[in-house]
Image (cartoon, rainbow, N blue to C red):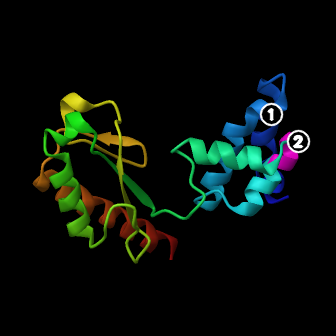
Amino acid sequence: MALLDTHKEEIDHHLAKYPDKRSAVMPLLYIAQEEYGHITPEAIEEIASILELDVTHVKGIIGFYTMYYDQPKGKYLIQICTDLPCALKGAEQFSEHVCQKLGIKPGETTPDGLFTVENVMCIAACDRAPVMQVNFHYYENLDYEKVDKLLEELRREHEASDSTQS
């Protein structure tokens, strides 16, 4: 059980917070996602075993909540709100611009694995549209120039972290 081997203290911390250990499913899913970049089938089985849950129950939680991923995503997950209030402020064209800039379509990941773009419904910032999240950090009142600069900064940040790890 890899997560128990590498994150035992953190898992025990979460288990101790709940009278019924099954209630720790969401924090354990976050641990797995952080460890592997997405929630792998092996992690699902391990979490189910730790919490004495059926694998189907754990998969159901992953399928219900949009913050969990059972497929690999880019290092930077870009979520662009295209719900009606944001759409009225040009969010769909904004999303098209971001995708064109990255050479992908919504729901896809760049070939280098750096960016994934998703159109989402409501991230609660309608009055500051166009708005997007990058790894759950908000960027508001965007325009094409601002988003182009942000994408360049993220790419440079990644390259800098790669060069320090080499």
Residue at mark 2? 52
Q: Is residue 154 visible?
A: yes
Residue at mark 1? 22
Task: Give whichever of 153, 106 is nearer the camera.
Answer: 106
Tell me: residue 104, above or below residue 136: below
Magenta stretch?
48-52
Residue ID at (37%, 42%): 137
Per the rendering, the mark at residue 115 is none
Q: Quadrant of residue 105?
A: bottom left
Q: Residue 10 at x, y = what percent? A: 75, 41
Residue ID at (45%, 64%): 74
Q: Are marks 1 and 2 in contact (CB under 8 Å)?
A: yes
Q: Local crowd at mark 2 within 10 Å, few (<14), some, or many (≥20)? A: few
Q: Residue 51 at x, y = what percent? A: 84, 40
Q: Residue 41 at x, y = what percent? A: 72, 62
Instruction: State the SS at label 1.
Output: helix
Q: Is residue 30 visible?
A: no
Mark 2: amino acid: Glu
Q: Local crowd at mark 1 within 10 Å, few (<14), some, or many (≥20)? A: some
Tell me: residue 154, above or below residue 159: above
